[in-house]
Image: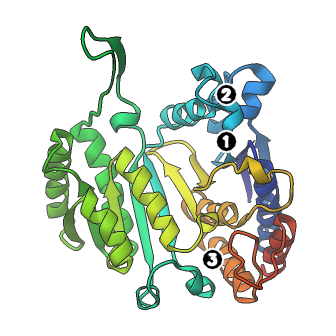
């Protein structure tokens, strides 16, 4: 069967890691009898340089013509806050999430067996295992709220960012979390700040109603500051963590680091219709771009998520994940995960090793 994939190679190390991932996808095609058609989509800082806009007209339409979207990374100091909004890569990310209706961001954080020593937590904590999924609401909250900037009479310049959530927005992300929990270990931890924020009190009330519907799934409320502490103290207690946009942005990065390296973790952004978007959770790392130093594993594992969730090809996803685990078990390391005395290989070599294991 033929599958059509939009490729947003992006900035910095993006083209390198997407390039290696495409080779892995093609290897899957050879083994399982699939063919793939790729559509290159210009977005990010490279688009701003080329056409003056980080999110060129027609970007969403190109992506909608495909079954899934694979993104490398966008951004970098070259396109910082001094640039007009339409030239900043972050503007493009928010726009594509909005236009494709990608309201649910899934970020798995699992400690891979071969890298247990890389976990920064106590050895006994790592030995208990870490395998959690952060489900982050992606198109609401303070990142998408109204912004204000005005001069006051006695306090100087003042700025505001509005944080707003509707019952509908909370219910759809909550249902996604409960459905994902049913496929895992059947536990949902809902994270909010209900002791302070009105939006969190609404969040909690909607989640309580959903918990009654999903009686087969264990449920708990947790304040965001406590969750931040518990992720360091005992991350093994979590299965599915669901939370609003800003809290999820922060907590998912924290969860990634307790697994040993941000360079290993994939993500998926999904809606109810249209293509999902898959990307590594790390940034564009412009300081090592073009030097064959980047770790392609997170992007390759994002492709595994694409096979599993967008194409319903679980065997193919399993094959990619097994190939990654085998490469790590054999001792192959890129610079970001190499320990003292361990030899580091480059982006291309790591990609080749993983392909050879499929």
The C terminus lies in quadrant: bottom right
- List the residue tagged with mark 1: 74
Q: Is residue 210 visible?
A: yes
Please name the residue shown 73% across and 63% down the image. Answer: 296
Q: Label 3: state its secondary structure.
A: helix
Please name the residue shown 75% across and 70% down the image. Answer: 335
**Numbered circle sitting on residue 318:** 3
**Pointer 1 with pointer 3, Cβ within 8 A:** no
- List the residue tagged with mark 2: 54
Please name the residue shown 86% across and 51% down the image. Answer: 290
Distance in Å between CA atoms under marks 1 and 3: 28 Å
In x, y percent, where is residue 40?
Answer: 78, 40
From the viewer's perspective, is residue 255 above or below residue 327?
above
209 vs 293, left or right, is: left
Does label 2 or label 1 sit earlier along the sequence? 2
Does label 1 or label 3 sit earlier along the sequence? 1
Give the quarter of the image for residue 210. Answer: bottom left
């Amino acid at each position: 069967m033929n599958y059509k994939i939009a490729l947003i190679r992006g900035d910095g190390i993006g083209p390198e890691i997407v390039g290696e991932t495409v080779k892995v996808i093609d290897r899957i095609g050879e083994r399982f009898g699939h063919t793939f058609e790729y559509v290159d989509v210009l977005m990010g800082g490279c688009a701003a340089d080329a056409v003056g806009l980080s999110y060129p007209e027609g970007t969403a339409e190109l992506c909608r013509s495909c079954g899934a979207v694979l993104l490398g990374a966008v951004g970098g100091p070259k396109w910082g806050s001094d640039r007009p909004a339409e030239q900043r890569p972050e503007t493009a990310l928010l726009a594509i999430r909005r236009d494709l209706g990608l309201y649910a961001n899934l970020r798995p954080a699992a400690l891979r067996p071969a890298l247990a020593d890389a976990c920064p937590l106590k050895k006994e904590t790592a030995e208990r295992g870490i395998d959690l999924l952060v489900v982050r609401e992606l198109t609401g909250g303070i990142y998408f709220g109204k912004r204000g900037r005005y001069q006051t009479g006695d306090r100087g310049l003042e700025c505001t960012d509005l944080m707003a959530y509707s019952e509908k927005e909370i219910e759809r992300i909550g249902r996604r979390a409960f459905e994902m929990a049913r496929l895992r270990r059947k536990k949902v931890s809902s994270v909010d700040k209900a002791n302070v924020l009105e939006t969190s009190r609404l969040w909690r009330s909607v989640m309580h109603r959903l918990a009654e519907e999903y009686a087969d799934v264990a449920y708990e409320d947790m304040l965001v500051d406590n969750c931040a502490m518990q992720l360091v103290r005992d991350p093994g207690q979590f299965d599915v963590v669901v939370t609003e946009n800003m809290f999820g942005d922060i907590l998912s990065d924290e969860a990634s680091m307790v697994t040993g390296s941000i360079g290993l973790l994939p993500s998926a952004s999904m809606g109810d219709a249209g293509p999902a978007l898959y990307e590594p959770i790390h940034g564009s790392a412009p300081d090592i771009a073009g030097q064959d130093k980047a770790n392609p594993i997170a992007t390759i594992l994002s492709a595994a998520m694409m096979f599993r969730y967008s194409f319903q090809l679980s065997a193919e996803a399993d094959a990619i994940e097994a190939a990654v685990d085998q490469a790590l078990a054999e001792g192959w390391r890129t610079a970001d995960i190499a320990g003292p005395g361990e030899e580091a290989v480059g982006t291309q070599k790591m990609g080749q090793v993983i392909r050879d294991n499929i």
